[in-house]
Amino acid sequence: MIWKIVQSPFVNLLAGVILVITAGAEVIENWGTFEIGAHHGVAIFGLLQILKALPEVMEGLEEIEKARRNKEPEGAERSTE
C-alpha cells in the first residue's frame, strides 16, 4: 500500500510543487544577498521532481481521454463547456 503511494506520479508532482513553492519563497526572500543556501538545492530538487512526474501524469491523462472518447456513443457530439 505505502509503495503505491510513494511511486504515484501525482504524489511526486505534488511534492515537487510544494518544494518549489516553499524553497522559492526562501529564494525570493534572500534575493539580493547573493548567498547560496540549502533552499537553492531544494528548489532544484523540486523542479526535477516535477519534470520526472510530468510525463507519467500526461500519459495517464491521455489514456483517460482516450477511454472517455471510446466510451462515447457514435453520434454523440462532445460538449466544449
Image (cartoon, helix red, strand yellow):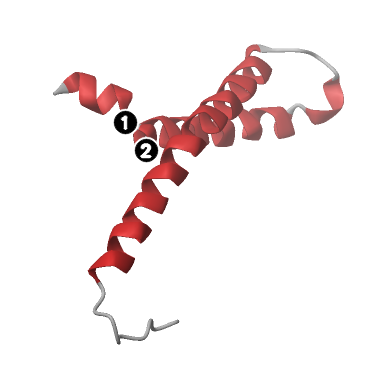
SS under mark 1: loop
- Residue at 30% over, 87% down: 75
SS under mark 2: helix
For residue 31, side relative to residue 4 (left or right) = right
Packing grade of label 1 (10 A; few <14, some 14-19, many >=20) is some
Decide: is 34 above or below 28. above
The location of residue 55, given as percent across then percent down, is 50, 37
- For label 2, the residue is 10
Q: Which of the 4 image quarters holds residue 13? A: top left
Decide: is 8 above or below 64. above
- For label 1, the residue is 8
Q: Which of the 4 image quarters holds residue 70? A: bottom left
The location of residue 2, given as percent across then percent down, is 18, 21
Question: Which quadrant, please, contains the C terminus?
Answer: bottom left
Disc 2 residue type?
Answer: Phe
For residue 23, side relative to residue 36 (left or right) = left
Disc 1 residue type?
Answer: Ser
Alpha carbons under labels 1 and 2: distance apart: 5 Å
The location of residue 25, given as percent across then percent down, is 63, 35
Packing grade of label 2 (10 A; few <14, some 14-19, many >=20) is some
Numbered label tally = 2
Determine contact: label 1, label 2, CB under 8 Å.
yes
Decide: is 43 above or below 28. above
- Residue at 64% over, 15% down: 41
Residue with the most extreme front position: 74
Residue with the most extreme left position: 1
Q: Nearer the viewer, residue 71 or 45?
A: 71
The location of residue 64, given as percent across then percent down, is 32, 55
- Residue at 24% over, 27% down: 5
